[in-house]
Amino acid sequence: MAQPLLGNSGALSILAGAQTGVSEEDARILRGLRAGIEDAYEELIARYEQPVYGLVYRLLGSQPDACDVVQEVFLKVFRAVNSFRGQSSLRTWIYRIAINEAHNHRRWFVRHCRHEVSFESDHEERGHSLEYALDPGRSPFDQALDNENRTLIERALTRINPVFRTAVVLRDIQNLSYEEIAEILQVSLGTVKSRILRGREALRRELTQQPGAGLAEAMA
Amino acid sequence: MTCWSVKRKSTDYVDGRLRAREQARIEAHLRKCETCECSIDQLRTVRSSLNALSDPLPPTSLQTRLRVVASRERKLLYETNGSRLLRVWNSWKFRLNQIMRPLTIPATGGVLSSILLFGALAFTISTTTRQVGYEVPVIYADHMDANLVPTELRSSVVLTLSLDGKGRITDYAFHDDTGSFVGNVSRLQYNNIALPQFPSVLGLARPTTRDISISFIPMVFRP
């Protein structure tokens, strides 16, 4: 195991013990990050790369943009780890950073690249073929239907209001509780419910308007 | 229970967050209202479809990028020993280097060029200065004393000047339709009309020693 670069981990353990929102495992990772232990960095990346990427990708709808934002998120986490006081869980904190970075990126994109037109209209044509975790128990037909439904839903997600999209993604895709979502977004519980309701309603309207097999027909 | 109430509680109902009593009331309404039942069914479909979405896998290059970031931050943490001030200073020093690096070569070239050019021109700067003021005191209606031609221009005038080779007038005379006039050089306020006394101009032009004639034709501007 790599040796810590800094010798103040003893003092930091007292601080970790005083934190109320952080689990023991998260506290251990935080101690390692503050001490500069390589294993702590590796563990943080291994634990949060996939969920943060999934969250950001659903918010932005673009793989290259999601990769850039995820890199920024982890950079901010590494730099701000000393200022994290443990009032929330580590996951809540990281997700909050991820959502803010995704929103900033989208605002920058709208401001600077709104008038640019891409020749490619599909992810595959751009050479960024997306990979998804496959269920080995599904038949090829079901997998094809899943692909089609996924395309319909992802397209519908990009069309609804980003504020509602965030709430729906956190609830229905990331499976976070209402309380966690309220903590991440720093809004009230009522606001979370309202955003989820309006997000689902907007998705329902989008999906019932889209022609095609599978999900859209099921909704009709 | 009204349709509006059902819609307002649809999120909690679909997520199973309602108390049993409230849930029963909604279900009783749904049995009577097809519109609300259809709406709730569609919301359930949306929710279950979102739940069933498989996770997008990040590209393998992303993990490499994150590791590079982690390595750089660990190095920075080691160099600054956790000091926030040192960290901020290093961060600004890095940004300044990034900005100045592409400007280094053109900036150096610009400075050297300026030094060479200034050095070459420094020898041409004259230490003596000469005040030069001149105008062509030929025909001014309201400056009659300075006029070479003390008359208002009513007809064509031919002015003959004798120059001494340094741009000064030694003698002058003019004639028009009414007669002729010989001037008094000593009365002229300015008699250097041929060439200004700039060394660079004198270097380009040659002063002449001879008589020159200038014709003036009056122009009448009608409003």
Image: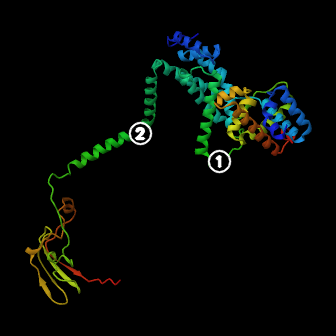
| Residue B84: mark | none
Looking at the rendered structure, the kind of residue marked 1 is: Val
Q: Would residue B58 be visible to someone looking at this image? A: no
Which residue occupies 14% across, 86% down?
Answer: B180
Q: Which mark is residue A117?
A: 1
Closest to the observer, B69 or A185: A185
Q: Residue at x 59, y 37 (%)?
A: A104
Q: Chain of mark 2?
A: B
Measured as percent of width and height from the top left, residue B209 is found at 13, 72
Distance, label 1 to label 2, CA atoms, is 32 Å
Residue A28: x and y in percent read 61, 13
Q: Residue at x 44, y 38 (%)?
A: B102
Q: Does mark 2 fall on the same chain as mark 1?
A: no
Front one among B156 and B163: B156
Callout 2: 10 Å neighbours few (<14), some, many (20+)?
few
Q: Look at the numbered disc 2 and give the secondary structure of its residue.
A: helix
Q: Quadrant of residue A70?
A: top right
**Between residues A205 and B107, which one lies in front from this camera angle?**
A205
Amino acid at pointer 2: Leu
Disc 2 designates what residue?
A: B103
